[in-house]
Image (spheres, rainbow, N blue to C red):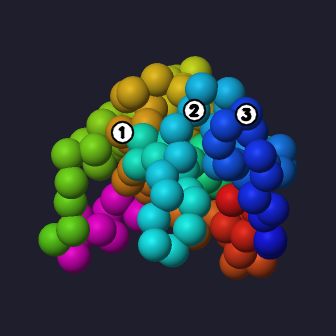
């Protein structure tokens, strides 16, 4: 996409299209970085964008599967990963959530906007539920 440099008061600037700013989750007062490669969201915004992508995966899973199916996938993945020696502390929390049978706790971990939900989504054990074309589409939209 081409941007036109325009006069803004005594300076020069560019107008970034609203859809691009929305994808970057940047609004008025937000920060962008100018690099040799172009303009991009500031690092903090990039982390937020990554979590937004992970939330979109989780939301799609919640739309397509019921809580018992999601729990079964979580526990199966955790069992497989533990047997292969792949384990991080978040998996202990996911295991506890999956075994608790509390739908609210499960959906809060998958879809919440708080720091704890963000931390848990960094290690999503419900991967494998979505078809590849859906994962590809969500990645492209992000």
Secondary structure, mark 1, is helix
Per the rendering, the mark at residue 30 is 2
Q: Marks 3 and 1: which is nearer the front?
A: 3
Against 118, residue 85 (above or below) is: below
Q: Looking at the image, which is closer to me, 61 or 66?
A: 61
The first of marks 2 and 1 along the sequence is: 2
Which residue reaches farthest left? 85
Marks 2 and 1, Cα distance to the nearest angstrom? 23 Å
- Residue at the disc numbered 3: 9
Region rendered in magenta:
76-84
Marks 3 and 1, Cα distance to the nearest angstrom? 43 Å
Q: Residue at x 60, y 44 (%)?
A: 52
**10 Å crowding of disc 1: few (<14), some (14-19), many (20+):** few
Q: In this image, 32 relative to 125: left or right?
A: right
The answer to whether residue 64 is seen in the rendering is: no
Q: How many marks?
A: 3
Q: Quadrant of the N terminus?
A: bottom right
Q: Quadrant of residue 81?
A: bottom left
Marks 2 and 3, Cα distance to the nearest angstrom? 20 Å
The answer to whether residue 26 is seen in the rendering is: yes
* Labels 3 & 1 near each other (Cβ < 8 A): no
Question: Where residue 115 appears, x then y in whole percent?
Answer: 39, 27
**10 Å crowding of disc 2: few (<14), some (14-19), many (20+):** few
- Residue at the disc numbered 1: 119
Q: Marks 2 and 1: which is nearer the front?
A: 2
Question: Where residue 49 appears, x then y in whole percent?
Answer: 56, 48
């Amino acid at each position: 996409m081409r941007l036109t440099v325009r006069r803004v008061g005594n300076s020069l600037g560019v107008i970034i299209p609203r859809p691009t700013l929305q994808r970057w989750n940047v609004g008025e007062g937000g920060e962008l970085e100018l690099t040799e490669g172009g303009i991009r969201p500031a690092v903090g915004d990039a982390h937020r964008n990554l979590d937004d992508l992970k939330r979109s995966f989780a939301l799609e899973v919640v739309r397509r599967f019921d809580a018992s199916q999601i729990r079964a996938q979580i526990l199966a993945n955790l069992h497989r990963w533990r047997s292969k020696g792949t384990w991080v502390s978040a998996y202990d929390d996911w295991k506890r959530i999956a075994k608790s049978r509390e739908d609210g706790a499960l959906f809060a971990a998958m879809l919440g906007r708080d720091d704890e939900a963000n931390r848990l989504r960094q290690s999503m054990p419900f991967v494998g539920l979505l078809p590849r074309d859906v994962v590809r589409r969500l990645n492209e939209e992000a």
